[in-house]
Amino acid sequence: MAVDRLLPTEEARDLIALTRDFADNELLSRVEAHEKTETYPEGLFASMARVGLLGLPYPEQWGGGGQPYEVYLQVLEELAARWAAVAVATSVQALSIHPVHKFGTPAQQEQWLPEMLAGRLIGGYSLSEPQAGSDAAALICKAEKTETGFRVTGTKAWITHGGIADYYALFARTGEGSRGISCFLGPGHAEGLSFGKPEEKMGLHAIPTTNAFYDGVEFEADRLIGAEGQGLEIAFSALDAGRLGIAACATGLAQAALDAAVDYANERTTFGRKIVDHQGLGFLLADMAAAVDSARATYLDAARRRDAGRPYSRNASVAKLVCSDAAMKVTTDAVQVFGGYGYTRDFPVERYMREAKIMQIFEGTNQIQRLVISRGLSR
Amino acid sequence: MKIVVCVKQVPDTWAEKKLDASKTLDRVSVDNILNEMDEFALEEALQMIAAHSGTVTVLSMGPDSATEAIRKALSMGADGAIHIVDDALKGSCAAVTSLVLAKALERIGDYDLVISGSEASDARTSVVPAMLAERLGIPQVTFVNKVEVDPAAKTLKANRITDDGYQVVEASLPAMISAVEKMNEPRYPSFKGIMAAKKKPVETLSIADLGLEADAVGLSGSWTKVNDSADRPPRSAGTIVEDEGNGGAALVDFLASKKFV
Ligand SMILES: Cc1cc2nc3c(=O)[nH]c(=O)nc-3n(C[C@@H](O)[C@H](O)[C@H](O)COP(=O)(O)OP(=O)(O)OC[C@H]3O[C@@H](n4cnc5c(N)ncnc54)[C@H](O)[C@@H]3O)c2cc1C
Ligand SMILES: Cc1cc2nc3c(=O)[nH]c(=O)nc-3n(C[C@H](O)[C@H](O)[C@H](O)COP(=O)(O)OP(=O)(O)OC[C@H]3O[C@@H](n4cnc5c(N)ncnc54)[C@H](O)[C@@H]3O)c2cc1C
């Protein structure tokens, strides 16, 4: 059953209706096949762009949808309930735009934002390296100054949409220490740039995650975003917003698992009654419903703080933690509700369970979220 | 080019349809949508003006709730709409519907092309387009799955689906065509389109605005009326054929008994 959402405007209600219509037709019909065969959904992001789903949280001035996070995240949630991989890539697309939007010069904004927000350019976000995940400041990929700009050399890892994206928000070292990292708008294809073969992942099969190898790739000077050495600040500022995206994706996934479990529990009978009417199972479903509702409330609270211009970094970390843990628990329990059938690929719940796990890992593991939250508590 | 697209709001294709006390369709208690066939008509019109420039006006007769179907059409890209809404219209038959739509088109005047769906999914008479063209005195090309217009020469050339193939038909403009399913791929409204639709003009007309009297329309004006109706009988239990080596033959016997083979 469709989630009964509290939305601030009629426009937002229309947007959610449009998203549902689009996602029911274009995502639900393709998700099984693409996730099973690990094939990229060609053309899908172009049609999402046409419908206007890729630039939602950015200003209309540049061609964005002008939507508050409160609304944009609920759109992501609806997408994730149909196809987690696509929702995650959509969230990463928004993340990749953040550096230019918030830290770019007017000239850079003019050059890049319209194409990015219209979805004519698909973006990736490239912070992690094989040895630098949680400890992003340990990254070593370097950008040396040249006469015309920078020369980039090194290995980046775990890039969502790697090899497919048209550009990457790339973080590379221009100096020593945590203030020696800079942010660039790297090209999708260039001489000296190659990508590894896609990781063999537990889930999110339809969207590749790859390494990137920079072998002396030349960047023009105007590809530097913000000041030299400002990179880590930019990366973390993007991640605050990105974490909210992941929180919403996790919630959508949990909602899908709950819906599937409730439907099944109302059909399947044992001992002469529907399994939902066995109190032991009914309570399991009740806990799942409570987890989904509280996850949604948590990310929406953080989103509203962001929309109101209030500090929200801690709330974003709480939301990422609460929502992804909820997704893990709810999807695991959904498999339980389906019994043996839940453990097969005939039903989507086993996929949901595999997809939920990553939500606790990327854009800051849940340990790292606790680190952020506890730092705020220490006096 | 000035194109008018006739669109009807209908109960959701999958909804259980019921008659109300006046033996007309209960349009209140169900979810209503834009008749799907009309989306093909609209898409065709939008592609035509993309190629030849011009405007697309949607025309709909229906209760207040039809504004939702009209909004959808506007968010897909139509430029404006005319909504004929009047309590007296309830219960109008196909002949009356075509009368009212014809009056509205006469009021619009300088249209080059009228496009409709070839069937509304609720009443499914398929006759409104033909009746409408007849009243307007313009050529009608119904059940079209392909069309090319030449605005300069004021002609169109269309493929018209028939039971055993298709006919290639030419007509002079202004003309009326009715679109069949799969004629094209109707676009999703974009989010920008939805927002823009709110600012597009929707003219609301009553039957008085069209110079019609109340008794010429609705149940009283209709040429036909529903005397009686019965619910479809519930499905009877099917026949189960046990396959004891003769399953194939038993199936053929069954189909033959129903005159399918
Ligand atoms: C229960 C029931 C009983 C009925 N009884 C009778 C009856 O006894 N006699 C009788 O003649 N009719 C009867 N009707 C049909 C009548 O009410 C039709 O709904 C109406 O005339 C439109 O015809 P249609 O839906 O068959 O349209 P179609 O001819 O199938 O529609 C073709 C196209 O015409 C256009 N169109 C149709 N209606 C409109 C509209 N209102 N506004 C704008 N464009 C439109 C659309 O583009 C549509 O795709 C009955 C309908 C119902 C549901
Ligand atoms: C499918 C997928 C997509 C991804 N997409 C992207 C992307 O688009 N862009 C990008 O830049 N990155 C991406 N990543 C990388 C992801 O963000 C990292 O994997 C993540 O940050 C963890 O880093 P790591 O794998 O190096 O783990 P490590 O940092 O090695 O952590 C290993 C374990 O140690 C724990 N740990 C580490 N430090 C601490 C500490 N201080 N206190 C307590 N526990 C700690 C961690 O929580 C974890 O459990 C993606 C990863 C995956 C799997």
Image (cartoon, coloured by chain):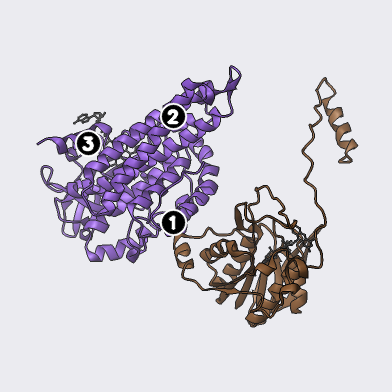
Q: Nearer the viewer, mark 1 or mark 3?
A: 1
The quarter of the picture where residue A273 lies is top right
Q: Is mark 3 within 8 Å of ligand 2?
A: yes
Query: Which residue type carries mark 1?
Result: Ala
Residue toward you, A159 or A197: A159
Query: Label 2 is found on which chain of the structure?
Result: A
Query: Which residue type carries mark 3?
Result: Ala
Q: Is residue B161 left or right of residue B194?
A: right
Mark 3 surroundings within 10 Å by alpha-carbon count, few (fewer than 14), some (14 through 19), many (20 or more) = some
Q: Disc 1 or 3, which lies upstream in sequence? A: 1
Residue A286 shows which numbered tag? 2
Query: Label 3 is found on which chain of the structure?
Result: A
**Is residue B107 placed above or below B19 in the rendered structure?**
below
Number of callouts: 3
Where is residue B241? Give x, y as percent.
81, 26
Q: Is residue A170 left or right of residue B129?
A: left
Query: Which residue type carries mark 2?
Result: Ala
Per the rendering, the colour in which chain A appears is purple
- Asked whether residue A159 is in view, the answer is no
Tags 1 and 3 both on a single chain: yes
Q: Is mark 2 within 8 Å of ligand 2?
A: no
